[in-house]
Image (cartoon, grey):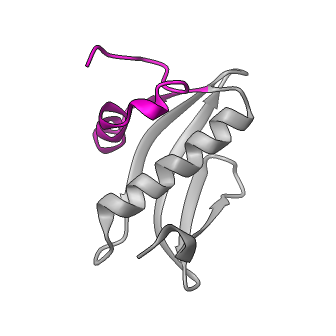
């Protein structure tokens, strides 16, 4: 599955980012906006039988784009999403807690 096969949508409550492919939700990230400058990711869910690592990465890319546009930093409470941040220094500009590599 390629990123171009997926569309992304923010849920009506503004706290969930959906990944949709062929009309079906295949994954999502739950988050909250904390004040004017932060996004806190609480968890990610990927539907069974999907390419979990790829979809998680695409969701992270999308929420990072949103954070950059809104001049926000991201903190992840989700271990899977935190791991993506750890392995991709190109996301450090939006990462709230930068750990030494």
Seen in the picture, residue 75 relative to 28 is either above or below; the reply is above
Seen in the picture, residue 98 relative to 89 is either above or below; the reply is above
From the top left corner, tell me how far across and down residue 59 is, in percent.
49, 54
Look at 66% across and 62% down and name the residue there: 9
Whether 97 is among the magenta residues is yes
Question: Is residue 74 shown left or right of residue 7?
Answer: left
Look at 40% across and 51% down and name the residue there: 44
The magenta region covers: 73-101
Question: Is residue 7 shown left or right of residue 90?
Answer: right
Seen in the picture, residue 55 relative to 48 is either above or below; the reply is above
Residues 42 and 81: in front is 81
Q: Quadrant of the N terminus?
A: bottom left
Question: Is residue 31 shown left or right of residue 45?
Answer: right
Look at 65% across and 26% down and name the residue there: 72
Residues 6 and 80: in front is 6
Look at 31% across and 31% down and name the residue there: 86
Seen in the picture, residue 1 relative to 53 is either above or below; the reply is below
Q: Quadrant of the C terminus?
A: top left
Q: Residue furthest front?
A: 90
């Amino acid at each position: 599955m390629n990123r171009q096969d997926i569309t992304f949508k923010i849920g009506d409550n503004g706290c969930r980012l959906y990944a949709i492919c062929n009309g079906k939700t295949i994954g999502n990230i739950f988050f909250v906006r904390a004040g004017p400058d932060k996004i806190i990711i609480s968890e990610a869910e990927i539907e069974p039988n999907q390419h979990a690592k790829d979809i998680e990465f695409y969701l992270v890319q999308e929420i990072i784009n949103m954070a950059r546009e809104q001049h926000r930093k991201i903190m992840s409470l989700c271990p899977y999403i935190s791991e993506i941040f750890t392995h991709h220094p190109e996301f450090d500009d939006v990462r709230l807690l930068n750990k030494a590599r």
